[in-house]
Image: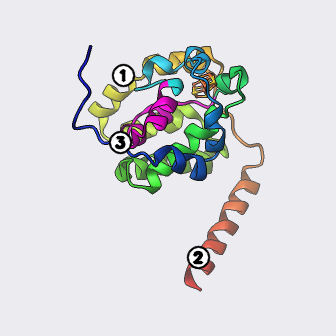
Amino acid sequence: MTAPDAARKYDLGFARWVRDNVDGGDKLSMCMQCGVCSGSCPIGTQMDYGPRKLFMMIRAGMKEEVMTSNTMWSCTSCYRCVVRCPRGVPVTYILQDLAAKSVELGYANPNDNTRFSKSFWWSAKTWGRTDERLVTARYYFSFGLKEGMRRSLDNLKIAYCMIKAGRMHLGMPHKVKDKKGLQAILKKAAEIEQRESGS
Ligand code: SF4
Ligand code: SF4
């Protein structure tokens, strides 16, 4: 039997905090640890912990491990877990909001987030859509050619799983038809933002 890790910190109020602050967190108490979500997840093997284990860790108060895990960042929002969960736990929403909370609370690397936001914004602005391949490639290569290659190769398996699950396609990026309309909306939004930040 493995000895308990004496250095590990437990936050006994963490499950309550998740219940009150995270979207869908109030449904976590419905989880019966059946593992259907983790077993259905196409990205499960790439996650530090599958959703079932992550939810168990929340109950155990393992705040640090949960908030710094790659689980919520690996989720591709395919909703397989949500559709299959026998207890109606909104797994995807919980993971999405845990990711947002990890940024708000300073667990996620702000430098990484800025780079990712820039890539996301570039895709939205250029195509009127966010294409996973372009956003990811731009984000990875923002760290330089060598690091971009390394990250791309490390995550090939995730890309394969996403294609298999129908979350990524291999054709040309989808784009909005009315590009002029898109530019007009963005221009207006920038004007409003400037006006409000100046007031
Ligand atoms: S499928 Fe639902 S009930 Fe089962 S472990 Fe996942 S979240 Fe819990
Ligand atoms: S929504 Fe996320 S956690 Fe759920 S099965 Fe899909 S990738 Fe896995």
Picture residue at 32% right of the left edge, 41% below the top: 143
In space, the residues marked 2 and 1 are separated at their CA atoms by: 40 Å
| Range covered by the magenta-colored residues | 53-77
Quadrant holding the C terminus: bottom right
Residue 188, picture quadrant? bottom right
Spot the residue most to the bottom.
Answer: 199
Picture residue at 46% right of the left edge, 56% below the top: 104
Q: Quadrant of ligand 1?
A: top right
Which one is earlier in the sequence, the residue at label 3 or at label 1? Answer: 3
Element class at badge 3: loop
Residue 97 sits above or below residue 84 on the image? below
Label 2 vs label 1, nearer the camera: 1
Q: What's under tag 2, amino acid-wise? A: Gln
> Which residue corresponds to mark 2?
194
Q: Position of residue 146 (x, y in %)?
A: 27, 31
In space, the residues marked 3 and 1 are separated at their CA atoms by: 32 Å
